[in-house]
Amino acid sequence: MCIRCAWVDLSKPDYVAYHDDEWGVPVYDDQRLFEFITLESAQAGLSWYTILKKRDNYRRAFADFDIHTVAAFDGEDITRLLNDAGIVRNKLKINAAINNAQRFIEIQHQFGSFSAYQWQFVNDRPRVNNIASPEDYVATSEQSDIFAKDLKKRGFKFLGSTTVYAHMQACGMVNDHHNQCFRKEQVIALY
């Protein structure tokens, strides 16, 4: 029998696939990182599964997360997005996605890539956490606090420490698979 992290709802095949194929796998591609940043900021106050179900709609609505295209979105695009039932129609979150794309590009110019900027917060190496029970999961870390403060200083929106920690988990900056989860060692082997 395959053991997975306890948070995975086995009745939702798309959630299981997300856990088994994506969650915690290190991501270094800027476009994918922008997708994760955008989706995590859209999730603020909602469940991740709500956003996961809407991910294909987000990809369509946000030009497959092409950073330069999203950074150039204007008033017409905002109106289009506010009328798109396939995404979370929150004007502040939509404006944040556009703003964050612009800030993302600034970081790319400064650091060569967003990936180089992001991974510095874990010294360019995924942190493997000891998750032996549900109580071992945390919502933030010292690194997510520092990362979130730096993002805020650079003008990013909807990316507090809790949201940033979820981003770090999703894109493999931290490996928070339960110690008994079959994916923990598989993801470690990718390093």
Image (spheres, rainbow, N blue to C red):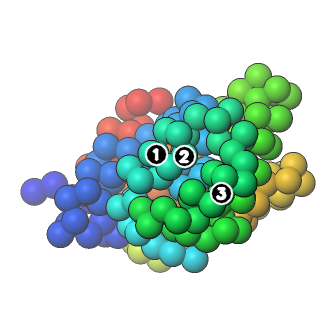
Evaluate whether residue 161 shows in this view.
no
SS category of the residue bearing label 2:
loop
Residue of label 3: 78
Which residue is found at the position 76% from the left and 34% from the top?
Answer: 105
Callout in the foreground (3, 2)? 3
| Residue 158 visible to the viewer | yes
Q: Which residue is mark 2?
A: 62
State which quadrant residue 93 falls in.
Answer: bottom right
Q: Earlier in the sequence, mark 3 or mark 2?
A: 2
Q: Is residue 95 left or right of residue 3?
A: right
> Could you tell me the amino acid type at mark 3?
Ile
Q: Residues within 10 Å of mark 2 (few under 14, many from 20)?
A: many
Image: 69 above or below 37? above
Real-space CA distance between mark 3 and mark 2, rounded to the nearest whole angstrom: 11 Å
| Quadrant assignment for the N terminus | bottom left
Going by the numbered disc 1, the residue's amino acid type is Arg
Q: CA distance from mark 2 to mark 1?
A: 5 Å
**Where does residue 49 sit, x and y in percent of width and height?**
38, 67
**Residue plotted at (68% across, 33% down):** 68
Number of the label disc, if any, that sits on residue 59 = 1
* Mark 2 vs 1: CB contact within 8 A: yes
Q: What's the mark number on residue 153?
A: none
